[in-house]
Amino acid sequence: MHISEAIKIAFLSLWANKLRSALTLLGVVIGVAAVIAVVTFVNGINTYVAEKIFNLGADVFIIFKVSPAVTNVEHFIEGQKRKDLTMDDYRAVREGCTLCAYVGAYARNNSGHLKYGEQTLNDTTVQGMTPAVAVTQDFDLDSGRMLTDSDIENNSPVVVVGTDIVDNLMPGVDPLGKEIRVDGWLYRVIGVGKKKGSTLGQSLDNYVFMPMTAWMKQYGVYKSNMRISAKAVGTGPTLDAAMDQARVIVRSRRHDPAGGADSFDMENNSSLLSIWSNLTGTFFIAMIGIAAISMVVGGIVIMNIMLVSVTERTREVGIRKAMGARRNDVLLQFLIEAVILSLMGGVMGVLFGIVVAKGVTLAVGMPSVIKLWAVFAGLIVAASVGVFFGVYPARRAATLDPIAALRFEM
């Protein structure tokens, strides 16, 4: 039997039992769709994190009281007991790190309340910072100017705002030079940042940047979130050397014992992305395991339906063998039918997974990136399921005795 003929017969058989074939596909569809959706979300989030959240550059590192990417509970609890980083720590690193091109300090409050005229805006990120932070965090302006050393020295009541502040708090108004209230304190707008968009339903443009000294004057306590960011004069070994310099300076200021652990955390882009990749990798493996269970269930359903099909078509098999069909011809016919059934489920699963991923992206802003390798992997897995679970029914059909098959009555 030619393969094209076997494929034609397989499609005719599946079309003759449309409802049964459609129900059989469900397990494979769900499994493949889950794999595609998970891979799409994981890749999308990883890409977003790399480009937006941890976009520090290959020559930037940050010193934390405790890293926000810590995954060890004991380390996190221990970190909360550490002393806060101070402006004196920042000044010591700025003056002593000869391999650092820029050193900045910043702290933030994520629940700021803003007011302009009769308009108000809540849950705004209010960040105190030194001018170098704009360089280390690759921050760009749309209009106006950035904070300067003079603003820090003079404790100037000035702010740089995000586009959400302009759109929601000051619609139709040129914000430069206008005064707004930040948690009750009056500040003058001197700049507007470039629009960043949103993710997971959260805007990235709802922020206010003010001089670090003004932030400290208003909020007083550091709130345990002051950080020191630095940009090294180079990457690779130069970055490592700059981090070592900064580590020695901060350890000496905090009187960390020789040979003991640091009483602070230090991360760069690579280490943060590595931690994040480990987290998403664990999530990915767990979801793939769940999807695999669905694929196995789908495969068992395919095998069960194919066994039913063999039983229903026993006389057909007998007639084909009586007319000269070889055992391999019958085996190929039923195996191709199983593979086509699972491949159809794979194609539908890929399309469904992409639709679900893009639908969630449109609904809540969760980033998603479709990878071509994931599509091919889904189809290959689906075909493999068809082959694996279709072999037994196909062998059973191929080994039927033609005389007994011709006498078979349903």
Image (cartoon, helix red, strand yellow):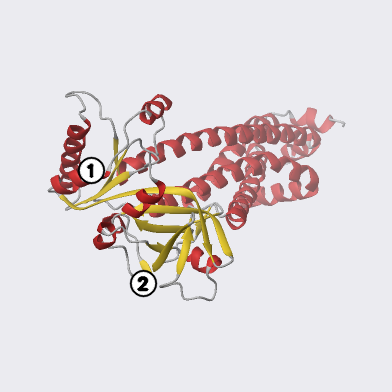
Which circle, 1 or 2, is nearer the viewer?
1
Asked if residue 360 lies left or right of residue 256, the reply is right
> For the residues marked 1 and 2, what is the alpha-carbon distance in whole angstroms?
30 Å
**Residue 88 tag number:** 1
Q: Quadrant of the C terminus?
A: top right
Q: Residue at x 62, y 55 (%)?
A: 363
Q: Residue at x 52, y 48 (%)?
A: 41
The first of marks 1 and 2 along the sequence is 1
The location of residue 53, given as percent across then percent down, is 40, 50
**Count of numbered badges drawn on the protein:** 2
Q: The residue under label 2 is which amino acid type? A: Gly
Can the viewer see residue 288 in this picture? yes
The location of residue 319, given as percent across then percent down, is 77, 39
Q: Residue at x 51, y 63 (%)?
A: 164
**Circle 2: element type:** strand
Q: Which residue is mark 2?
A: 144
Using the image as rendered, state which of residue 239 and residue 324 is in the foreground.
239
- Give the vertical position of 152 relative to 10 (above or below): below
The location of residue 306, given as percent across then percent down, is 72, 35
Instruction: Please tell me how crowded label 1 is: few (under 14), some (14-19), or many (20+) other residues with Cα within 10 Å.
Output: few
**Residue 344 tag number:** none
Give the farthest residue toward the right. Answer: 409
Q: Quadrant of residue 153?
A: bottom left
Can the viewer see residue 390 in this picture? no
Using the image as rendered, state which of residue 173 and residue 318 is in the foreground.
173
**Circle 1: element type:** helix
Instruction: Please tell me how crowded label 2 is: few (under 14), some (14-19), or many (20+) other residues with Cα within 10 Å.
Output: some
Q: Residue at x 66, y 36 (%)?
A: 298
